[in-house]
Image: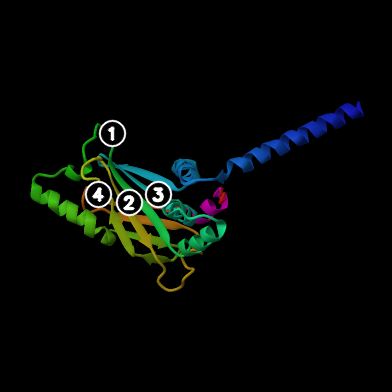
Amino acid sequence: MTMVKSKSSVLLIACIALFFAGCVAEKKITGLKEFNGWMKEPKNGLTMSRSVNGMIITVSYLTPEYNALKEMEAEGYKGKVTYDSLLAYYKTTASFIMTLAPDESKNNNGDIMYKGLKNFKEYVERAMSLNFDLENQVTLEADANIYAPSLSSLDNTYSLSTDRKVNFVFTPVNKKEELENATHYNFVYRDEQFDLGTLHFYFDKKNIEKNLPEISIP
């Protein structure tokens, strides 16, 4: 009887060990495509969306690990030493991508650039604002500090897409490590184009870092 219990205990322990080993194995990323998929999962806290006035506004936090891996693949770099060097640089900054898209669940599927416009003059004004004035409509709250973007860029799709993506980069003001040491990020968008009002996107930075998968660099 004791031997049967002993074998059962060993089997149970082995199953538990295999379960946790499987969990660890799942939390390893080997490429940018895989990272993109992981980042889009709402439960992981890197991507958040709001539905307002017939539009979907989505903001994604691009972690330093993501940016380092993206540059590695874009430039054809190899090796962990290079990755670690890029990672150290990106840890001093905070990067986000905001997507403005029609809310198809509300039967809106047209190009957002034309939403609510009356004439070509209004279209030009919107295009200019999205290209050159978004830096004045976005701020990042990181703990007690507030930052304006040091860089923003609109992806020009030449009307081949109904949405628009805008990249934002924030850099330190006082200390090199202040963004790296922040516990949370609150991305604030004060819209002036689509009657969306002020939108907040809150990211628990420390929790994201805690649950971030291991990045496997060959």
The label number, if any, that marks residue 156 in the structure image: 4
Are there few (<14), some (14-19), or many (20+) residues within 10 Å of tag 3?
Answer: many
Q: Where are the magenta residues, as a range?
A: 204-213
The label number, if any, that marks residue 104 in the structure image: 1
Q: What residue type is labelled 4?
A: Asn
Are there few (<14), some (14-19), or many (20+) residues within 10 Å of tag 1?
Answer: few
Is 209 inside the magenta-drawn segment? yes
First in residue order: circle 3 vs circle 4: 3
> Which residue appears at 40% of the width and 61% of the height?
141
**Magenta stretch, main secondary structure class:** helix
- Disc 2: which residue: 199
Relative to 181, 190 lies left or right:
left
> Which residue appears at 44% of the width and 66% of the height?
144
Measure how far apart labels 3 and 1 are at the Cα level.
20 Å
Measure how far apart labels 3 and 2 are at the Cα level.
14 Å
Relative to 159, 56 lies left or right:
right
Relative to 214, 19 lies left or right:
right
Question: Residue 104 or 64: which is nearer the viewer?
Answer: 64
